[in-house]
Amino acid sequence: MLYAKEYIGSIGVGVTVPQLIRADDDNVYVVKLKNNRLGMKVLVNEFIASRLGVLIDLCFPASDTITFTDEFINSSKRLTRLKVMEGLHFATYYLRGSKYVHRYHLHAVTNKKEFAGVMLFDHLFHNVDRTLNGKNMLIRREIDGYRMYAIDNSHLFGSGRWNKENLAIMINGVKLNKRRAYGTLLRHYLQESDFTPYVERFQAITKDQLDQIVDNIPEEWLNDAETREELKLFLLARCAMAGEVAAMLISLIPNINGGA
C-alpha cells in the first residue's frame, strides 16, 4: 500500500478525472479517486485487472492502492474543491515520456507479442474501451527500444457501472474486437503461437487465486458480499474460456482457418 505525499496536478484527460500524486516511495502515480463520476466500481475494475495482470505477466504499469489522509487532502485546494474523500484510492505508475499509440508506431515496438495477452484479457473481461478510446495504449522509448503498455482498465465488464445481474448476462458472451491497433496487430504482427503462453497462464490460475483477488478488494470500494461471490464465479468461468476466446482471435489472423 502507498501513502499520498504530494499533490502534483490533474492528468488532464479521462472521464474519471485522474490526478497526479507523488507517493511515499517518491514515485509519481496516476490516481483514480473514490469519488470519480463513474463510481467506485472503476477502482474495483482496476484492482482486479492489476492483480490478474501480475499473474498473467501483462504489460500493465505497476499499480497499488494509495491512502489519502484528511491532512493530505486539506493541504491541497484542488483536492478540497474536488471533495476528495479520505481512505483508499487506486494508483498506477506514471509513465513519463510516453505517447498514445497509433498504428504507424507498431513496426518499431519491441513487445508487440505481449499484446496477444492484453487482447485476450480484454476479450475475456469485456473491455472494449482499449480500442474505442485511443488513449488507453501508450508507447515509450526505453533502453531496449520502444515498448508498448496497456493502461486504464476502468471499463472492465462493459463499464464502471456493472452489477451482479450484468455479470450473469456477460458470463458466456464474446464480442470480437479488431478496431484500430488491434486490427493492425492481428493482420500484420501476431501469430497463433503468440497467444499460446497466455492461454496456458489463464488456464493455470486457480480458484483460490481468484478468490483471494476478490477477497482483497477494499471493503470501502465493494461491501456487497453477494456481488463478490458473483465476481468469483465470473472470473473463474472466463479464465476457463481462454482457449476458446483465443481461437476466435486467431481466426482473424490472415490465412489462418480462412481468417480475413
Image (cartoon, rainbow, N blue to C red):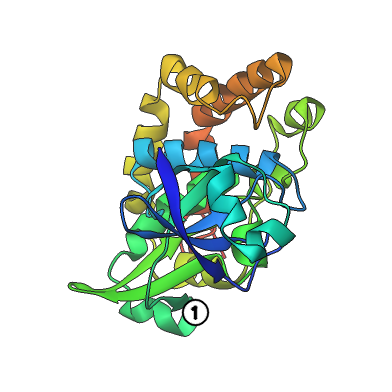
Quadrant for residue 85, please give it: top right
In this picture, is 242 found above or below 58? above
Please state the total of marks drawn on the protein image.
1
In this picture, is 113 found above or below 232? below
Residue 248 in view, yes or no: no
Quarter holding the C terminus? bottom right
Direction left: furthest residue:
143
**Dot 1 amino acid type:** Arg
Quadrant for residue 13, please give it: bottom right
Quarter holding the N terminus? top left
Picture residue at 42% right of the left edge, 49% below the top: 117
Of 196 and 130, the residue lying toward us: 130
Of 190 and 77, the residue lying toward us: 77
Of 48 and 198, the residue lying toward us: 48
| Tag 1 secondary structure | helix
Residue 178 picture location, percent across and down: 60, 63
Residue 221 picture location, percent across and down: 65, 32
Picture residue at 58% right of the left edge, 24% below the top: 237
Picture residue at 72% right of the left edge, 19% below the top: 224
In this picture, is 131 found above or below 46? below
**Neighbour class for label 1 at 10 Å: few (<14), some, many (≥20)?**
few
Of 93 and 144, the residue lying toward us: 93
Relative to 97, 72 lies left or right? right
Relative to 158, 109 lies left or right? left
Residue 139 in view, yes or no: yes
Residue 65 picture location, percent across and down: 48, 41
